[in-house]
Amino acid sequence: MAVPLLLHLTFQLSYLHWNTFTMPVTEVALLHLKCKDPSALTKEGLKQAMEKQSRFSKHPVNILFQIQDPRYFYLIGGWESITVHCNEWIPSDTNQTILRMIKDEVDIEWVFHIDTDVRSPLIC
């Protein structure tokens, strides 16, 4: 069962150190297509999500599909801070319109932030 996005983000934010709210982060979200063949409206909504989130955040947004079950896919994007993501993008009219477009066919399973700028190389 998918966790409601705002509830999950509220829970997640309560455990973060104060400075992580103002530093660049990478968002990783797991989404689930409820049907095998998404409608044209859902496909358009996902396309708009990538384009409009990238424009808003000024960071690239990528979608990666699971090989084992391509109905599960990851949205990976960058943010100047968790505050910008949670307080500006998520409640924005643009984002809420997109979420309404895809809500019948896509579940947001979870969302979290990694303490690295998506534009920076990862250190393993």
Image (cartoon, helix red, strand yellow):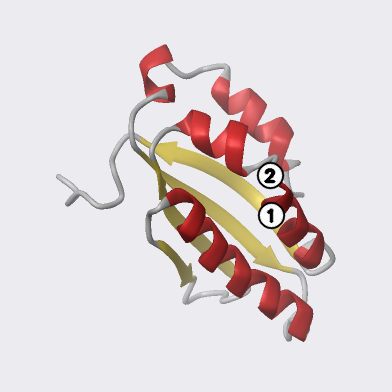
Residue drawn where x is 61% and y is 69% of the image: 48
User: Compared with residue 54, is residue 3 higher up or lower down, i.e. above or below?
Assistant: above
> Is 64 positioned to the left or the right of 24 in the image?
right
> Is 117 positioned to the left or the right of 111 in the image?
left
Front one among 1 and 89: 89
Front one among 88 and 109: 88
Q: Label 2 vs label 1: CA separation?
A: 5 Å
Q: Amino acid at mark 1?
A: Thr
Residue drawn where x is 79% and y is 66% of the image: 101
* Secondary structure under the numbered disc 2 in the rendered image: loop
Where does label 2 land, which residue?
92
Q: Identify the image quadrant of residue 23.
A: top left
Find residue 72 and name its label. Answer: none
Q: Amino acid at mark 2?
A: Ser
* Secondary structure under the numbered disc 1 in the rendered image: helix
Task: Tell me if mark 2 has few (under 14), some (14-19) or many (20+) residues whose alpha carbon lies within 10 angstroms of its own.
Answer: few
Find residue 94 and name its label. Answer: 1
Q: Identify the image quadrant of residue 25.
A: top left
User: Compared with residue 92, is residue 61 higher up or lower down, i.e. above or below?
Assistant: below
At which x and y percent is residue 54?
Answer: 46, 59
Q: Residue furthest right?
A: 104
Task: Tell me if mark 1 has few (under 14), some (14-19) or many (20+) residues whose alpha carbon lies within 10 angstroms of its own.
Answer: some
At which x and y percent is residue 68?
Answer: 51, 75
Instruction: Tell me whether the residue at label 2 lies in contact with that at label 1, contact meaning CB atoms closer than 8 angstroms.
Output: yes
> Is 72 positioned to the left or the right of 99 in the image?
left
Q: Residue furthest top?
A: 18
User: Compared with residue 88, is residue 99 higher up or lower down, i.e. above or below?
Assistant: below
At which x and y percent is residue 20?
Answer: 38, 23
Front one among 111 and 46: 46
